[in-house]
Amino acid sequence: MNGGELIAEVLEKQGVRFLFTLCGGHISPILVAAKRAGIRVVDVRHEANAVFAADAVARLSGSPGVAAVTAGPGVTNTITAVKNAQLAQSPVVLLGGATGTILKGRGALQDIDQMALFEPHVKWATSVSRVRDLIPVLLRAFSIAQRGVPGPVFVECPVDLLYEESLVRRLYGQQADRKGGSVGERALNWYLRRHLNRLFGDAERYAAGDPVKVEIPQAPRSAVRGTARMLARSSRPVLMVGSQATLDASSVADLAAAVERLGVPVYLSGMARGLLGRGHRLQLRHQRRKALREADTVILAGVPCDFRLDYGRQINRLAKVISVNRNGEEVAKNRRPQLGVVCDPGRFLRSLAEHEIGQPVWEHWLEALHLRDRERVEEISRLADKTTQYLNPLALCSQIDRDLEDESILVADGGDFVATASYIVSPKKPLSWLDPGVFGTLGVGAGFALGAKLCRPEAAVWILYGDGSVAYSLAEFDTFVRHEIPVLAVVGNDACWAQIAREQVEILKDDVGTVLRRTDYDVVAEGFGGRGFRLERPDETEKVLEQARQEVAKGRPVLINALIGRTDFRKGSISM
């Protein structure tokens, strides 16, 4: 077996169903062997989108997503996506090609110090130097990516480890097997033989083995008891559940049941959006800041006190705070909790729900929070009725929300339009919302949608794009067409980087760098083989959305270029 086949065998044993890539000679043996092993190889148009797709697979399945990219520019193109996965705590395994082991530092094609580039941005980065080490290194990579605080790992696979031994020996030069010649030639031949013998020695020493099993950090009983006591004495509790609570994707139904048993008013964020379905009596969406300022007990389940909570200042300074996180550093970040617990927040909530809390009365508190929610919904409804030069973005988002299928996944990729949508468009089920996370990366849209549709082919996958972010991954419509991946993208096109322009113009009196065109993104999608619609008039919204869904049902990817007007709905949203 060559090195590519060894890697494919490990991927197959670990249950990897998809390998995302952009081809290159450095990694060709991996791709060919993966295909022969029954793994679906999905090639994209930019390497970052291969990693974004792997990230989406990880989030939706709970198992590492895998991407393979070629050396040099291939791996450098993934850095933003890798960093996004690190900050989002997604287990991703990135296989990177590299120049031959004997040629490193000698001016070979695309030879750079890839390890120095990746080490700050992954949980583990390593370079394999012998064929015999490919299997154990990959098994370790799968383990590290998943355990503790999950995250990406980078495995550098030099090209001479991946091809057949006879071919590699031939490419290094026949002189390695020759006798005689000058002293210098004999020394070179000896060195080459020694290096190649080490490279391929004991190549069949290890077997791919069984799937890696990783222990999920459990909740300490004392912490569960302490939290139960605090809740029993609380009159205004708030529960916040973030993405980290859903890392164990196979247990989200149990997590939802636990949150319901607890009976605590809850705000959901990130991958936890949709956890309780739509319209659940415990779930609140709006006026979270006010709720936190009035709460007497706050449970942060996988939610750090970063800029999204104004570094902890949104929480009542007299409130008892229970912070539960797999990352010990994030437990006490910016706000020291009364109780800090380093464990899996999903497991913690499930254990807490099994504990006897007593008969606390929170109905009046819950109703007060719901009253604020209803007031905000009514305000949004009034704003959606306002006439703008083009489509009112709030009205468009409201129609999308009404049209969502029960089995839908929403991919959020944009600034102002997508942030507006997050107030209005609600996922109907758990694990149905994908956004970049704390890094706020633009460009995740096509990669996330690709991974989501492959994981859940029965789901309708929607991409909500801003007209700034769509340019990062619009070329992947070619990928959607080639691989028969029908997704529905809606671009909120206001010809502007609106989230930046709104504050920049007011504060600095200049719109430099924020002006775009009302580009025909629908025509571009058509050029790549998809189906495009241009939406300009409010009375056409329902009809166009229905036509788009019909095209998706036929197996075609669709892009709706929705020309929207500008509003002040999110005025003052800039953050430091």
Image (cartoon, helix red, strand yellow):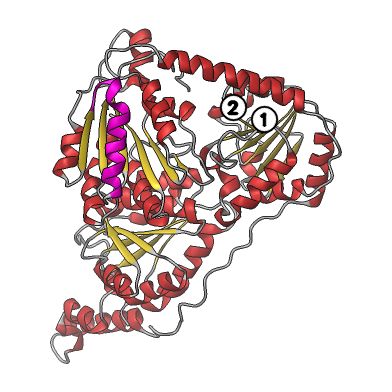
Image quadrant in which the N terminus is located: bottom left
Q: CA distance from mark 2 to mark 1?
A: 7 Å
* Position above or below: 521 against 186: above
Question: Tag 1: residue type?
Answer: Arg
Q: Which residues are magenta?
A: 535-553
Q: For the view shown, which residue lies furthest in the bottom direction?
A: 179
Give the secondary structure at mark 1.
Answer: loop
Answer with left or right where residue 199 lies relative to residue 283. left
Which x, y percent locates residue 83?
42, 45
Give the secondary structure at mark 2.
Answer: helix
Which x, y percent locates residue 211?
52, 71
Residue under the image location 26 percent in, 21 percent down: 537
Q: Is residue 345 visible?
A: no
Question: Tag 2: residue type?
Answer: Tyr
Q: Are marks 2 and 1 in contact (CB under 8 Å)?
A: yes
Viewer-proximal residue among 307 and 175: 307
* Position above or below: 294 against 115: above
Residue 335's mark? 1
Which x, y percent locates residue 540?
27, 25
Task: Point out the tag, 2 or 1, that comes first from the N-terminus.
Answer: 2
Q: Which residue is mark 2?
A: 311
